[in-house]
Amino acid sequence: MSWENNVRKVEPYVAGEQPKRKDIIKLNTNECPYPPAPGVAKKAAEMQCDDLRLYPDMNGEKLVNALADYYQVSPDNLFVGIGSDDVLAMAFLTFFNSDKPILFPDITYSFYDVWANLYRIPYELCPLTEDFRINKEDYLKPNGGIIFPNPNAPTGVLESIELVEEIIKANPDVVVIVDEAYVDFGGQSVVPLIEKYENLLVVQTFSKSRAMAGMRIGFAMGSKKLIDYLKDAKFSFNSYTLNMPTIEMGVEAVEDDKYFKEITGKIIATRERMKKEMAELGFSFTDSKTNFLFATHKEKPAKEIFEAMKEQGIYVRYWNKPRINNHLRITIGTDEQMDRMIAFLKDYLG
């Protein structure tokens, strides 16, 4: 018998391309175009190598407390992990153990089905409407758990708190996870609902709005019971969630709220300007409340535009998948980067 018969085989998640070229405009992975808060660099410069010989605090207590203060929740309602992918993967492992399928949208973050397949969790895709919105009725049937981003990715569409609460309220016997990776760019968080619904887990990240994708910080907020179960699973998998420099620099990012609002405000303003300028070039898109646009052109196929932009060193995201194979996901960069992209598109589209 071959040893390969006992291998857990799974088709892995494919992240956006990380090109080696330096002379590019990188708008394909939804990273923040601005640096982290100034205190992050200051803290990094102050750290001593001798500090690294000791294990970090396994609870990340200093960062947990900073986040708890910021979001006005108890530290008992908060869990930190190595990026929101780590937090979500642990949540799948911890909470989705029913024989019934978990539910999530057919157009959404493409890691969800990967985790489901990895952990052998049955799942069912719920089709978004023609305008890429959640159909509430799809989530009112028996299931083993629910997860969806709000705003959604890659569509950028924001659902109302009222709709989200209806889904949570209708599913008291399963855990409902709301992935709020992009909520800081114009959305309204459902974190206040964790006091009302014991089965709600809200997940956020430092990778987008706090400009720290390279540090890998994610966190979840929920009832104490949910968080305790999540910790039990995580500490059985890896007892040290975040390294010491990440904890220290993460605190600096949380405490500089003025800078946080400044860079998210810049990105929102640039996004709204791009909607107008790209519409003039024949593009249409959803009313994005994220740090990207989900765009399609009235004449030129998305794949052709994608390849032409890439040749010019402008990287955006394209999926050759049903329903979205004529769309591009374009991260909002600096004003200078977006102006260069618009200049290229004007020339390319004639």
Image (spheres, rainbow, N blue to C red):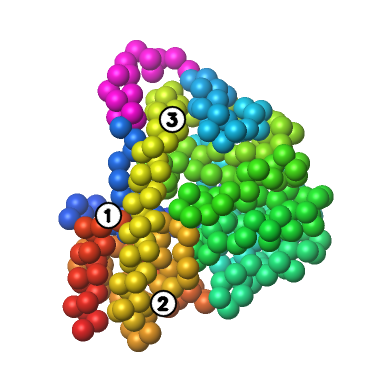
Residue at position x 45%, y 57% in the image: 290
The residue indicated by pointer 2 is: 284
Part of the protein shown in magenta: 39-55
Give, as a three-letter code, the residue at label 2: Ser
Residue at position x 31%, y 78% in the image: 280
Give, as a three-letter code, the residue at label 1: Thr
The residue indicated by pointer 1 is: 334
Task: Give coordinates of residue 126: x percent, y percent.
Answer: 66, 68
Residue at position x 53%, y 44% in the image: 204
Q: Quadrant of residue 16?
A: bottom left
N-terminal of the pair, mark 3 or mark 1, is 3
Label 1 sits on a secondary structure element that is loop
Residue 283 relative to residue 197: left or right: left
N-terminal of the pair, mark 3 or mark 2, is 3
* Residue 255: mark in rendering: 3
Picture layout, residue 19 above or below residue 243: below
Label 3 sits on a secondary structure element that is helix
Give, as a three-letter code, the residue at label 3: Glu
